[in-house]
Image: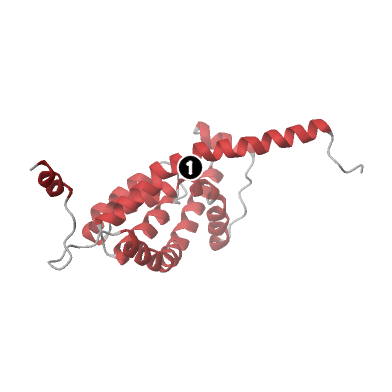
Amino acid sequence: MGNEPTPPERKKKERIFLRMPRIGLILMPWLNRKIVDPLIQILRRGAEPNQLAFSAALGITLGIFPICGVTVLLCGIAIAILGNLCHAPTLMLANFVATPIELSLVVPFLRFGEVISGSNHFPLTSDALRKVVTGQASREVLFSIFHALLGWLIAAPFILGILYVVFLPCFKYLLHKFSAVPSSPMHPLPHPEINIKVRDV
């Protein structure tokens, strides 16, 4: 019986479990407003599934660029260059979704770039991070940034291709489910304004 939690520990766990629903109540409306609702609007406007899949894959690939603060600029450049080949709202939404993933992939890209270039591992110490933040970047820090960029450049085409293959069937299904059905002479869509006018008459 000695493994049973003491009353203070039990109360602490109960407080943690009570907080979890509150976090969910706060997080879910935010996710719906920032991600789910914009995605549904994109789907209802209609677009080609391959265009949406490519745009989402490109947005995430650019969104995990290992230098923070420039992903929106990269997406803007991509939209200007690609034009109608990409769907701008989908690309920007995917870039926004990738924001939490960006920081978690900096170190993997750094290590991958070091392996590709055959360089020694850069020590991720607090002193090195302080030099980056304060702008006192040493030669090693600059090389580490280069290695992270190198790792991303080599991995980006593979990430883009894999995400496109994954997203394409997803968008085909979502477009079939959420896109508006075009009107036809045999099955015209109901028009709310016409119904109101008839009732007024």
**Residue at the image position 36 percent from the left and 49 percent from the top:** 93
Determine if residue 54 is in view: no
What kind of element bears circle 1? helix
Q: Quadrant of residue 17?
A: top right
Q: Which residue corresponds to mark 1?
A: 28
Q: Would residue 33 be found to the left or right of residue 114 on screen?
A: left
Q: Is residue 25 visible?
A: yes
Q: Residue at x 56, y 45 (%)?
A: 140
Name the foreground residue: 179 vs 118.
Answer: 179
**Residue drawn 69% across the image and 33% down it:** 15
Q: Quadrant of the N terminus?
A: top right
Residue at position x 74%, y 33% in the image:
12
* Quarter in which the C terminus is drawn: top left
User: What kind of residue is marked 1?
Assistant: Met
Q: Position of residue 114 (x, y in %)?
A: 56, 57
Residue 61 x %, y %: 42, 56
